[in-house]
Image: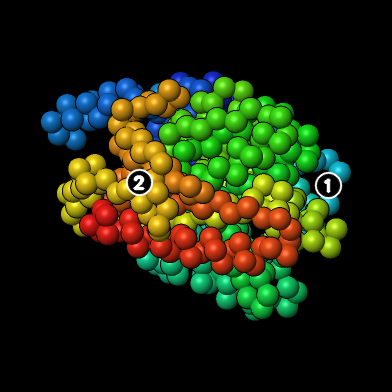
Amino acid sequence: PLPTPVLAFAIRHLGAVAGVEVTASHNPPRDNGYKVYLGDGSQIVPPADIDIAAEIAAVPSLTTVRRPTEGWETLDDSVLDAYLARTDAVLSGDSPRTARTVYTAMHGVGKDVLLAAFGRAGFPEPVLVAEQAEPDPEFPTVAFPNPEEPGAMDLAFATARACETAPDLIIANDPDADRCAVAVPDGTDWRMLRGDEVGALLAAHLVRRGATGTFAESIVSSSLLGRIAEKAGLPHVETLTGFKWIARAEGLRYGYEEALGYCVDPDGVRDKDGITAALLITELASQLKEEGRTLLDLLDDLAVEHGLHATDQLSVRVEDLSLIAAAMRRLREQPPTELAGLPITRTDDLTKGTAGLPPTDGLRYTLDGARVIVRPSGTEPKLKCYLEVVVPVGSHQDLPAARARATDVLESIKRDLSAAAGI
């Protein structure tokens, strides 16, 4: 039982030609399956997935599959030790290590590896969410073992509130520990940061540390990353959704997508990694703490510097997959001309591909000061709509009004888009 990023690391470390991780990832127990990596340490892309599916379909019965009784080698802890040693490269040698954390493994396999990484780095030992600390494939305390889902973080919030010494942040991994969620104190309670917010914070931290190379993100993630990269004079690219595409960006130094996935050390792990992302965000929180500031203060600074980039999602889970196809068909046959009173200035049907992207089932709407992308989920029975509103901000005093404006526009877009798609 090891995190998926340890496997992604091990493939390159061992010079293997492929790797398989058996996991339900952040999905319900019944969705248990496996992730496949090729020899470069990144997830498979077409046509490898089609070729594998054809081999599966060609098996008439499991009883016909030959099972060798020898020729196997069971690895010892040396690969995990090498992964943990590699995490040293994630942090600055002289950075403060003072931020206190509450941590949940969400019934998955992240606990032991994260605790070892935090101990190696010299951070205070995280306070564990005891009810979710040990691996349990039934995920008994959550409806969905995904930190983004309603209720999944409730026990983590309760643990943080009960701490004698107030923690600086809450960190959550999904069960296979390739995703990382972050929550912070906000007034008298706790607030989950959106994946786009963490993505921007990590980018700003890496820029401040002098990172060079390409900053990459999926097309459904916030355009703020592009603003940060442009200001720093760094290359920036957008890819299709998924780290199987992000990890292939040329010269990658940092990649993220809004679904809580962050690649902060592509030379070590060419995929999203919830362990190293947790280390880096805790280093940033420690640095800000020494300055008497917080992650929320840095988000405010980024909004003033680049404009407030507010994101949200309209996500509809279905039992009947035909409802997703019907919604996409309706949007194509009866395309909306405006959303939230904002005219749609451009519509891209992504099934046709673009100059920089291969074809995918999706629609992208560009509005004046906003952007919407609609696509079927690749891993769950969901239709997902990604919304972004950008509001100019003159000063810190303008932030409350900008946030109120962004919230109103996002809610209006949700209502109008839901009606247009018939969902």
At numbered mark 1, what does the secondary structure look like: helix, strand or loop? loop
Asked whether, in this view, residue 408 is left or right of residue 226, the answer is left
What's the amino acid at mark 1?
Answer: Ser
User: Do the residues bearing badges 2 and 1 touch, measured as CB atoms within 8 Å?
Assistant: no
Rendered location of residue 12, percent (x, y):
56, 25
Q: Which residue is mark 1?
A: 95
Rendered location of residue 211, percent (x, y):
74, 33
- Gap between marks 2 and 1, in whole Å? 41 Å
Q: Quadrant of the C terminus?
A: bottom left
Where is 43 relative to 3, above or below? above
Q: Nearer the viewer, mark 2 or mark 1?
A: 2
Q: Callout 2: few (<14), some (14-19), or many (20+) C-alpha neighbours within 10 Å?
A: many
At a point 83% along the width and 47% down the height, the residue shown is 95
Foreground of the two, 360 or 165: 360
Q: Callout 1: few (<14), some (14-19), or many (20+) C-alpha neighbours within 10 Å?
A: few
Rendered location of residue 315, percent (x, y):
36, 56
Asked whether, in this view, residue 134 is left or right of residue 352, the answer is right
Point out which mark residue 385 bears.
none
At numbered mark 2, what does the secondary structure look like: helix, strand or loop? strand
Foreground of the two, 289 or 307: 307
Q: Which residue is mark 2?
A: 374
